[in-house]
Image (cartoon, rainbow, N blue to C red):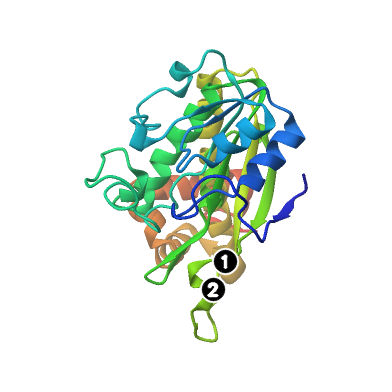
Amino acid sequence: MKSVLSFPQRGHWGKSNWRGNTSGYIIKEMIEHFKPSLFVDACEGSGTSGDVCREMGIAYVGLDLYKGNDFTKDSIIQYLSRPADICFTHPPYHNMVVYSGEVYGTEAILGDTSRCATPEEFIARSQTMLLNQREATKEGGIYATLIGDHRKNGEFRSYQSDFIQMMPKSELLSVTIKLQHNCLSDARQYHENFIPIVHEYLLLWEKTSRSLFAVSMDIASELQKRVATTWRNVIRMVLMKLKEATLSDIYAEVERVAGDMIAKNSHWQAKVRQQLQRHFSNVQRGVWAL
């Protein structure tokens, strides 16, 4: 298994008419590399993973929303006789393809993440999915997801970036790029600045012995660090422009360049002072510089 995978043919596994099918070759690569004895797919779609596992003699459990298994509210581990060696998902890419009521069934299902109203809702539910997968995986086992970038109405989202940020950094094992072939969009004509999306990401984490609570605290701590770093860099950019500045001038420039951040923090002036005191030079009373 390498960091770039390319399979021009979809293979004979699963159903070719099921939109958004996982390539069976992806499943085969994971099995050959990690040699699991129990493979779990928590959103199996048309059954590609199960077909590959049966062919390779690997114990398999397949779950999906259309079968009554909702990874946003049902614990995956409850369906298993023991923790998985690999717990895999290939979830919707938000609303790129809408599943319940369209690909399967006649009505929308509440837990369908392809029907999330916003990207933020999709990301939040996807974190539940990933934590659920992690809890269903044995210590030292692999939890993984296949996710693509998404462009709709001119907005581009790289969901793999969101997924990586909201899971424990210490457990990320690999980011593998899987090239896409035979897409519906291949025949379309695009304007000259448009860059078609022709790849997906297979994200692989290796579960450690740390508890869900400890992992959650680490994730929260990382988010807090990123927020603090962003504030520090905003102030650095302000001081790069102003050279030396009074606190009132710094406040005014921060208001101008970081209005969105300020809107989310009613105590932003205290945050500015905190960052100045920690990371910048007080060249004279009330005047700051890099």
Q: Secondary structure at mark 1?
A: loop
Task: Quickly name the residue at label 2.
Answer: 186
Q: Residue at the spot x=61%, y=45% of the render?
A: 24
Q: What percent of the width, then of the height, locates residue 76? A: 45, 24
Q: Which numbered tag is attached to residue 150?
A: none
Of 279 and 288, nearer the camera is 279
Quarter placement of the C terminus:
bottom right
Q: Which residue is mark 1?
A: 182
Q: Amino acid at mark 2?
A: Asp
Residue under the point 38% across and 53% down:
119
Residue located at (35% from left, 46% from top): 121
The crowd level at tag 2 (other Cα within 10 Å; few <14, some 14-19, many 20+) is few
CA neighbours of label 1 inside 10 A, class few (<14), some (14 to 19), many (20+): few
**Cα distance in 3D space between marks 2 and 1:** 7 Å
Identified by mark 1, the residue type is Asn
Residue at 55% over, 72% down = 196
Do the CB atoms of the residues marked 2 and 1 lie less than 8 Å apart?
A: yes
**Of 171 and 242, the residue lying toward us:** 171
